[in-house]
Image (cartoon, helix red, strand yellow):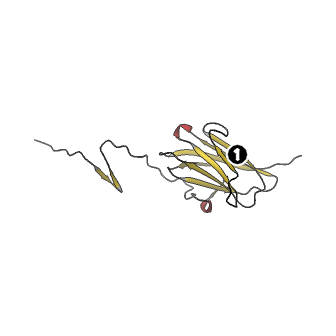
Amino acid sequence: MLVGLQIGSIGCGNGSTEPGQELDEPCADDHLEPNDSSQEASAVGEHSLVLCPGDQDWFSGTVPLDYFLYFDVLWDSTAGNLSVALIDSDGSSPTLAEDDEWVAEGQIGMVISGPFDGALRVALSDGQSSPTPYSVSSFIEFCCDG
């Protein structure tokens, strides 16, 4: 008995793949999605999240006079690079921190002093081709000069 085997393109959803072609790792939204713009920003806090390729996650918080916002991002740096940008309520970006210049590889830490006029927006962006899990830790603390 002879069995025929055809080797060629395999159809899949919106396109096709060639034999042996690797597919990108699937990426599922985390529990805060959609938080992909300043209008959809999630409140700062404690979160375990994932960035999908081309994704941005936004967080917001208000920092009153005499207070500081501590914002810390941790991830496995072998999974890719992340950047954090502070965006004032007027849309300007006074601070940009990248993992190779801020705290340590796989960690970005920021301390933002108040007051800020309106909301504070923090964007995380990932230019990698595979999902990047990360965690965010933040809190606001009163500070006085004594």
Q: Secondary structure at mark 1?
A: strand
Residue furthest to the bottom: 39
Residue 94 pos. (x, y %) = 70, 52
The image quadrant that residue 102 belongs to is top right
Q: Is residue 45 visible?
A: no
Residue sitting at 79 percent across and 52 percent down?
67
Residue where numbered disc 1 is placed: 110
- Packing grade of label 1 (10 A; few <14, some 14-19, many >=20) is many
Residue 99 pos. (x, y %) = 62, 40
Callout 1 amino acid: Met
Determine whether, in the image, residue 2 is placed left or right of residue 126: left
Determine whether, in the image, residue 14 is placed left or right of residue 117: left
Residue sitting at 70 percent across and 61 percent down?
90
Q: Nearer the viewer, residue 68 or 102?
A: 102
Q: Is residue 141 visible?
A: yes
Q: Nearer the viewer, residue 15 or 30?
A: 15
The quadrant of the rendering that contains the N terminus is top left
Residue 135 pos. (x, y %) = 60, 45
Query: From the viewer's perspective, is residue 76 above or below residue 31?
Result: above
Residue sitting at 19 percent across and 44 percent down?
5
Residue furthest to the left: 1
Residue 133 pos. (x, y %) = 54, 45
Residue furthest to the right: 146
